[in-house]
Every structure is written in structure tokens, then in C-alpha cells.
Amino acid sequence: MSLSPQFLDELRARTSLSALVGKTTKLQKAGREMRGCCPFHNEKTPSFYVNDDKGFYHCFGCSAHGDAIRWMTDQRGLPFIDAVKELAQAAGMDMPAQDRASAVKAERAKGLHDAMADAAAWFTEQLNGIGGTEARGVLAKRGIAPDTARAFGMGFSPDSRGKLKTALKDYGDPALVECGLLIQVEGKDPYDRFRSRLMIPIRDARGRTIAFGGRVIGDGEPKYLNSPDTPLFDKGRTLYNLDRAAPAARKAARVLVVEGYMDVIALAQAGIEEAVAPLGTALTEAQLERLWRMVDVPILCFDGDGAGQKAALRAAQRALPLLGNGRSLSFVTLPQGQDPDDLVKAGGAPAMEALLQAPQALVDRLWHSEVAAGPLDTPEQRAGLKQRLAELAATIADASVRKEYESDFKNRFYEHFAPRRRAFTPFAPRPQGKRGADGQWKQPIAPPTEDVKAFHAIGIDRVLAKAVLAGLIRHPVEIARHMEVLGSLKLVDGALGRLFEAVVDVALEDQALDSARLRTILARTGFDSVAGDLLRADTMPYSFTQSGGDPIRARADLDEAIAIMVARPEVDMALGEATASMQAHFTDEAFERQVALVKEKQALELRLANLVQSNEDARALGSEGN
């Protein structure tokens, strides 16, 4: 089907946008426009405007913007073509003619939709009839109220191989087999697929029944039986309760993903209506994309048992290649042995809301999972962890997000395995020694030496500071990301310190600044000579100080250099004080502390040496290629 721009323009012109929006959002006249509280985010003061003359809506709070078709896709959650069809029907317009194959396919789908709708109605009749007594007892035992069962269209399939087939005989066996209601075995007559089961309709985004889930009544296997894939139903692309959850998710600004039908139904009954569930499979890429159309960070609320946590980890790994700016996942781990259904039965909605207040970020879930995967006592085991983290980050297609994950994993690794320092207080001078209770003479703790005092004044390593500053001039977008730690550079006096302050001031005024424009501005303010000397410093063996090369690698190395530059003064200061204490009074505790600090300093030096060596190798390889 081809939809011309002229057809779409006519459709928009014939649609009263304020009437369309007003069906679900309260609007009031405001001059030539209509105004109300935005349906896309929670607000108390109206900032959402609808302009019929111009044919668009706009929210000044969250920047939601669009026309009638966009309203149907974003607020109602409809696919584009379904949105157009519904608006065209309301406007009295005929859709453009389809080609013959498309028309046949559409007519066949219409017949299948009708069959599924009649099947859902028949199952509901059975639930409310004499034969549904046991099924109604199951619902009551599980705490499902009659109003909730009606809202979700729940029903009952009798223990019969042919009652549904007979009830829907006008559709013919082939159509009922095609939509999954009957099972066809070669050489035998088709028979009812669902028997003696509590029936749960699975609906598409428009609320049409496209499949069923059946929970066994009493004993039997499988416990849950889903419809097979059909022309209407693609299990890997469908989310249960999407039609009801999509508008609720936009209002609540969140969407929850739980494991099963009953979890969704129990949460909705408790007042949490923005929950969906995959259909017996691991969360797929198509389902993730559908979730991201509703919110940027869906919350996965899987069971606390081993199977639930494995499912959460699979979803995390599957999401990695698809991540984008602001688009991620978060996780809530339920108490061991409980699912959302159990949780709200015991504590109501507040019990679930308490867990939802502090979801775990995707990067945290991946890090903790890899750290817990096995022992990390040997260098080889730690190298394995580093390799696994690098492989996870490498799967991310978005370069900027991948870089952030690589940097985050690297920082977590060094923080996790760095030698731990004991907390200490600065040493205060004492006027004289004295005897202790054991009669032994105790030496006074020595005051800080002149070397330690001098170190406090000097602060950071000027050589490394020059390299970092050169890197910031070449990659000015990194300045805003590191403002908190880069404050230590202000300890550098003279021309270097003044250049740093000028670079920061310029970069903060324009965070999209590139290196060439930054250097032009610096030249105008008299810093061209100092900046030029830094950028001509070919003796600086780092990727971020060189022109050309891989910018992603250069920024990652710059991140690492900044971390080292900020950590070294603190370690050196603590080591100086520990050494002074050892000189004054030797104890096992003081010795252990000094040894730990020496190891920590060595670890920092090794990190810096690795940066130098890796980039020398990179330049050597570049020279060979030339």
C-alpha cells in the first residue's frame, strides 16, 4: 500500500486534533489553543498545548510534539499503518487501494481476527457458566477479583476435544487451524488445542485478540500453553498486556517487565498498570525495541530465583548491542522465592513500589554478575575478568556508549583490586616524650616533614598535567565530563594553571566546541604560544596528545590519565606521612600501612606505564603501515 503525502495531508486536515486528544486528556480553552496537563509526563501545572489551526500538539515541559498520526503512535502505541487506518475511518476517508496480494492477505487477516474475537467471547461465556465453577474457584484462590478477570477478558476452555470447534464451525476448520485454535494431525480430524484451562487472551497494541495463553486447571503439563505462531501472532515480537500498559506507562513514565501473565494481572489489580510480560521466551530484540518506544529505561522485575536472574542477565546481554544515548535497562531483584504476584498479595502496591525506588543500572548488573562468576584470586583469573568485561563492552554498537562502558569497567576494575588503605588522621606534633603504663619510654609522633609540607604545596605532577591539558585541548568535549576531578589542576600555578582555567571557561560556554575552534579562541586571548608549545610536545608518548589516530581510543586513554593524575598526589601524600611515622616509631601496623601504600603507588605507575607502552606500540605500527 502506498500512502501519498497528499493523502496524509488531507487526513490531518480532516482530523480535529483537539477532539482526538480530548478523548483521553482533559483540555481547556486558552486563547486560540487548548491547554491541559501533559499526558506524556507527570505535571501539576498545564504546559501541554493543542493547536487545531496548525495541526500539532506541543508540551513545553517534556518537548513532546506531533500531529494526529504521531499522537496515535506515541500515545496510543499503534503501528503507523494502523494509526492511519483508524484516523481515516473516523474521518470518512477510504484508504488507498491495495495491490491484489495485499488485499487478499488483509481480508484473510480480518477473518482470523473475527475468529479470535469470537473464541475469546466463547471462553468468557464458559467461565461464567455452570462448567466454569472450578475455574472461578482457581481465580478466587489466587485473589483475582471478578472485575479484574473481566478487564483482562479471562475465560475457560472445557475438557473437550470439539466444543470450541463446534461453536466456531462457521469459520471452517482450515481457518481455525491457521489461527491456532485447532490442532491438525495428519490423517485425523482437527481438534481443540486448549482443554481444561484457564484462558488468558493475548492482545495486540490495538486491543485485538491475536492469541491465547492457557493455564492448566488442576494437575497436568504443560502448566502454561500458548498459541503457536500464526499470521496474527509472532511470539518473539509480542508483549502481553501491551495495549493496556502503553498508555499507563506514558502516564507513569516507566514500564515494568515481569515474567508471566499472573504477575501482570496481580500488579494491575494492585494499581500498577504499566507492566508487560514476554510470552514464555527470553526477552527478544524486537520486544526491547518495543519497550524503548514507551520509555528510555524499562525496569525488568524478574523473580529472585536462579532462573529469574539468568533471564535478567540474558536480557542485559541481549540489550547491549542496541544501547543508545539515554536508552538502557534497569533491574529490580525480587526477594528469593517470590514473584510480583506473591509480593503484592503480601504487602500490596507499597511493597512493590519500595523495590522500584532503587532499581539497579544495567552496567551495575553486568559488573556484579561478572565479578560473581568465579574466583578472582590469581592474576590469571583477574585477567579473565578484564577480558570478559572488554568483550561485553565491545558488543555495543553505539561508539559513544561503548566508550563510556569501557571507561566505567576499567575504573571499576582498578578500584576493586587496588590495595586498600587504612583510614588515618594527620599526624599532630607533640612537645615531648613520656613513659607509658608499662614503664617504657614512648617517642612522640613526629610532625610532618618539610618534604611532606612541600608536597602539599606542589600538588599534582606537572609533566602529567601538561599531557592531560594537551589532551583536553585536542578533545575539549571531555572537559565537562571531568570537571569534578579536574579541579585539582588548579593547584598548578604559572602559565599552565592560567591556561587550564582559560580552557575550562571556554569549553563550559560551548560544550560542543571542537579543538580547532578552541585553539582559535585561545589564540585571541593570548594563550596561543603556551597552547602551541603543549601541542608540539612530541615527547609526550600518549594517544591523546597526538594529532590523528583513533579518537575513541584517545579519549579512553585520556580518561585513564586523568584518573591516575588525580590519584597520585593522594597516594604520595599518604606514603610520605607513613614514612615519617615509621622513622619516628616503628610498629607492625605502620610497616604494613607503608607497604600497602608502596604497592598502591606501584600500581599507579604501572597503569601509567601501560598507557605509554601501548601508545608507543600503536605509533610504531602506524609507522610500519606507512
Image (tube, rainbow, N blue to C red):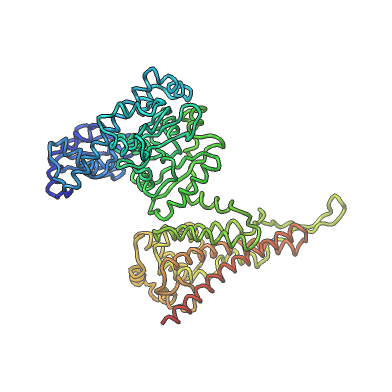
The residue nearer to you, when weighing 493 against 242, is 242
Looking at this view, name the residue that lies furthest to the right: 439
x and y percentages locating residue 59 in the rendered image: 27, 42
Looking at this view, name the residue that lies furthest to the front: 187
x and y percentages locating residue 463 in the rendered image: 53, 72
x and y percentages locating residue 325 in the rendered image: 38, 54
For the question of whether residue 247 can be seen, the reply is no
How many numbered circles does the render carry? Answer: 0
298 sits to left or right of 420: left
The residue nearer to you, when weighing 346 against 493, is 346
Q: Is residue 379 above or below residue 8?
A: below
The residue nearer to you, when weighing 466 against 286, is 286
Name which quarter of the figure residue 76 lies in.
Answer: top left
For the question of whether residue 461 can be seen, the reply is yes
128 sits to left or right of 341: left
The residue nearer to you, when weighing 255 against 120, is 120
Q: Is residue 250 above or below residue 489?
A: above
145 sits to left or right of 293: right
